[in-house]
Amino acid sequence: MNEKGAVLPSVMVFLLLMSIMILGTNRVFENQMNQLRMTKHYYEVESMLILAKMELSSQYEIDKEIRKGIVTFPNGIVTIQRKEGNVFILNGTLKDVFSKQLEVELTPQTTEEQKVKEEKESKQDSPLEK
């Protein structure tokens, strides 16, 4: 390597390899960030759907004739559409970025189940006797 001009090609090859390595690392980082963002969106929509399902369930106990509705959240909305009988389709949309659909079948609570539930609640509310 004592010859004149032999250092420049070596430096150029070294810089080329370093550039490829840095660009590859940058691409892996971008992919991981996109995956993290999609996972976050998925769990946010999933949480919205679960909360909307709970709200639908409580409203269904009051009014069995529900046809459609909208549940609004700070970061998106869930639209509710009755498919047939007691089957509903919940479509959660996260600020037009991500959406997921869920099909829910609600069963009306029988009067016996309601009585048992009320009895349990009244037992929990009453003070313990010694």
Image (cartoon, rainbow, N blue to C red):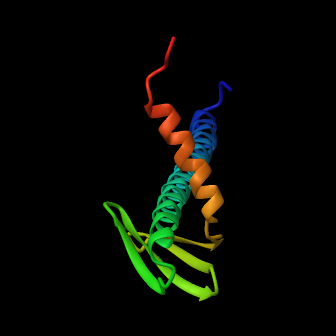
Residue at (39% x, 76% y) in the render: 70
Q: Quadrant of the N terminus?
A: top right
Q: Position of residue 52 (x, y in %)?
A: 47, 64
- Report the side of 110 relative to 70 (left or right): right
Residue at (55% x, 85% y) in the render: 82
Residue furthest out toward the left: 74
Residue at (51% x, 52% y) in the render: 40
| Vertical relation: 2 (above or below) 21 | above
Of residue 34 and residue 11, the one placed in the foreground of this image is 34
- Report the side of 9 relative to 64 (left or right): right
Count of numbered labels shown in the rendering: 0
Q: Position of residue 92 (x, y in %)?
A: 49, 71
Of residue 39 and residue 109, the one placed in the foreground of this image is 109
- Residue 103 in sight: yes
Residue at (44% x, 33% y) in the render: 125
| Vertical relation: 112 (above or below) 86 | above
Residue furthest out toward the top: 130
- Residue 26 in sight: no
Q: Position of residue 17 (x, y in %)?
A: 64, 42
| Vertical relation: 54 (above or below) 97 | above
Of residue 25 and residue 9, the one placed in the foreground of this image is 25
Q: Position of residue 42 (x, y in %)?
A: 55, 58
Of residue 25 and residue 91, the one placed in the foreground of this image is 91
